[in-house]
Amino acid sequence: MNQQLNDYSQAVSQYIENLPKDGGDWLVAQRSSAAERFTEIGFPNAKIEAWKYTGIEGLLKQGFETTDKLPEFPEHAVLRQFLEEPVAGRLVFVDGVYQADLSTCDTAGITVGNLRSAMAASDRAVLEVIGSLSGMGDHGFAALNLATVHDGAVIRVTSETCLEQPIELLHVATKSAEGQALRSRHLIMLETGASANLIERYVALDDAAYFNNLVCEISLAAGAKLTHQRVQLESPRAYHLSDIHLGLQADAYYHGINAAVGAAWSRTLIHNRFTAQGANCELDGLYLAGDGQLTDFHLDVDHAVPHCDSRENFRGILHGAGKAVFDGLIQVREQAQKSNAHLYNANLMLSRHAEIDTKPQLVILADDVQCSHGTTVGQLDPQAVFYLRSRGLDEQRARHLLSLGFASEVIDRFENETLRLQLADVIRQQLQS
Amino acid sequence: MGLPNTEMEDFVESEYAQGFVTEIESDTLPPGLDEAVIRTISERKGEPPWMLEKRLTAYRHWLTMREPSWAEVRHPPIDFQTISYYSSPKKKPLLDNLDQVDPELLATYEKLGIPIDEQKALAGVAVDAVFDSVSVATTFRESLAEAGVIFCSMSEAIREYPELVKQYLGSVVPHKDNFFAALNSAVFSDGTFVYIPKDVKCPMELSTYFRINEANTGQFERTLIIAEERSHVSYLEGCTAPMRDENQLHAAVVELVALEDARIKYSTVQNWYPGDNEGRGGIYNFVTKRGDCRGDRSHISWTQVETGSAVTWKYPSCILRGKDTVGEFYSVAVTKGMQQADTGTKMIHIGENSRSTIVSKGISAMHGSNAYRGLVRVAAKAENARNHTQCDSLLIGDRCAAHTFPYIEVKNPTAQVEHEATTSKVSEDQLFYCRQRGLSEEDAVSMIINGFCKEVFNELPMEFAVEAQKLLAVSLEGAVG
């Protein structure tokens, strides 16, 4: 492990040294301190509570490389992945590299761009936001991301702009990503009273093994509203790690709808600390884990001020030898009176070798609050299966139909119909395999 | 129901009712812990060499361990070399009857309401009173002996029933289990031993009162209950301690073994000195309690009412090894002043059709901190395992804390596991309803809290249920309204 840590540390310092010097001093300084932080904290291990059930040995063994390679890909294959609906703006990343030709944005009130050009232009307004919500990183991977960040989306919606159409943020992985560690970092900023709908997707064209190590910072100014639909459909050999940090100002509203279906190993952390009153955060999620897959969701909702609401609803389906980990922490600090926080996690186990480790947590330090959590692990109701069989469906189809019904509570939360249909299709296919 | 107000006032004035110290000469080892101390303990208790060997093995292992820090409790570090590990009332010539017992000691029992005299025959409770570390008197031995039940102190069991002790001691909680279990295995002073033979339903509820008396002496109780096939037993444990300013360490180990079709019900009311409202003094209570449902269809039920101690660290657990086994955990934990409790349970489902129920009610008031920490694990072979967990926390005042940390690990697709938890304060609506029916605010709160805990109190044996309600009212006095 230490050997590996040294290798990584060396690779990181080399990467920073080789960077073009026009990247702006400020970010280089940030990178160096993140590299130091990485050397200091190293990789997480099973002794760290948050990583108890999520092993990273497989990920480290792959030895993914930190290089900036330009991808080669057939354009039409990427175009096929686009949403059918008209969009207010589109950002396309292939193997972590921004594709200006494929990206569009001609709607008033939003500016989209990529981090790399912001770095090249030493755009302080953008660069200074980096790390403002995520810090240096709570674990080694997040620190690595900051130290070696390659590119990412920068989306800003100006004050009082209400977008009718969604913004699409598309990540495509091709076979040239094989063996690579992709390090993207997204900044999404909504100014006062703005409202937007963001669709973020991770898809793969080929069956490559790569490591997508992402950090996303989302800041909502007072009264801003963001609906964030997020679908992870990485290649079945991929590793995917997302750290999402939310900053909600007074009366801001964030609704995140997440689906984690692909990747051999995936972990999504959603961290939200309420720092202004009247904000509301809702998170829905669906995860599916089959043979050889590990899917992990970590939610960390911190009520640091009074009068904020949070609601979380996560559902998981385990089949084959799939393993899922769920950890949902709700914290209410001393002064955060009148907080409402509710979390629900349901898990459906369809097969003998599946495993689920779930841990909802409440840490409550204020008294005038309404907090609850509930979690269940169970299987399909045999009577419901029997009912469907008596209507002429075979056992397999009956079970798939019921599993889909279980998932639909979260799928229906996706506002975009294409996404809903696509997800239902993927789930059906996965269950059949 | 709450107590009438006059009675409440009495309680307020009386501070900690059980806070008195009995002055009896006792034979105490100087503070410190090394192999020589363990040899001395073993020698004083007249133990056979195999027992000394067990203690030394545990001690040597303990030296390699570190004190755990994961619990949601804060306290100054414990210096294990400043504690005296053995204290026994001075040896007296053998006594023929109660009259010859030191009247001071009897008076202490009177004050505590320990039923050591004839009156208890009517109550049908046999009491093995542990005064500090050595069992002083045991009653009802004869009627129990008739049924074949062995109910005696651990030291006596080591002397009289070495085979049983050798077979079962440490078989549920091995000395390597955790830091405090290792310490206990090395230095345990005394405790209770219960053996219920096959097909016997224990004729009465068994009960032990523990008292920590000597200043600066840790109590390291060791309890072992063995229920043979088709036997039943209900065991009550109640605790009070005199008021002392220095923190006292208590690290008990309780082991339960239930064989085929056996049933063990273990009830605890813990009311040790919690320290004053600024957090001075109070007992540190680090307990390892575990029941092993070894036989098919066996049943272990833990019920606890925790109102005392400055720091509580306690997770009565069930290993559901046999088929169709049942584990239950019912708990009320109250923390006020500066009290901290990190308590919960583990239900390890190994056998087919094993079922478990967890009901945990936490009440935090003033600066109290209360954490539920539980684990439900369903092993790959535990077909049709079933668990339902309910954790509710009630917060009184804006300086207190309530935490819930359930761990659920399932490796079998036929398992059904449910967990639900809520945290809130006493509902304004309920309070308003009671007030407009003419109840004072204090009575209303008391009534609502009792209702909140009812599910757990219902599981307690009659005598304890009454005591528990009284205790709750007293514990929360000054914290509500």
Image: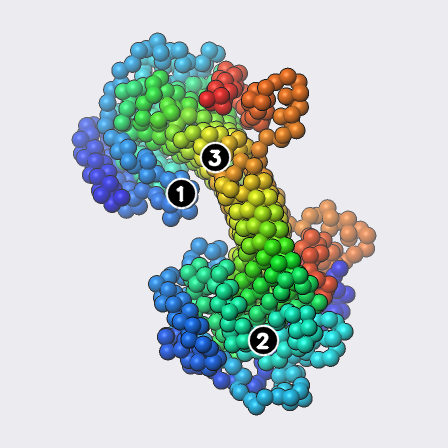
Q: Residue at x 58, y 63 (%)?
A: B226
Q: Amino acid at mark 3?
A: Ala
Q: Chain of mark 1?
A: A
Q: Is residue B36 visible?
A: yes
Q: Which residue is mark 3?
A: A354
The label on residue B130 is 2
Would you say B449 lies left or right of B401 here? Answer: right
Q: Residues within 10 Å of mark 2 (few under 14, many from 20)?
A: many
Q: Are marks 1 and 3 in contact (CB under 8 Å)?
A: no
Q: Nearer the viewer, residue A216 or A156?
A: A216
The label on residue A51 is 1
Q: Using the rendered view, name the quadrant where residue A16 is placed.
A: top left
> Circle 2 sits in a helix, a strand or a loop, which is it?
strand
Residue B264 point in image, percent of width and height? 63, 59
> Circle 3 sits in a helix, a strand or a loop, which is it?
loop
> Circle 1 sits in a helix, a strand or a loop, which is it?
helix
The Cα–Cα distance between marks 1 and 2, rounded to whole angstroms, is 45 Å
Q: Residue at x 63, y 78 (%)?
A: B138
Q: Amino acid at mark 2?
A: Val
Q: Is residue A372 visible?
A: no
Is residue A11 positioned above or below B280 on the image? above
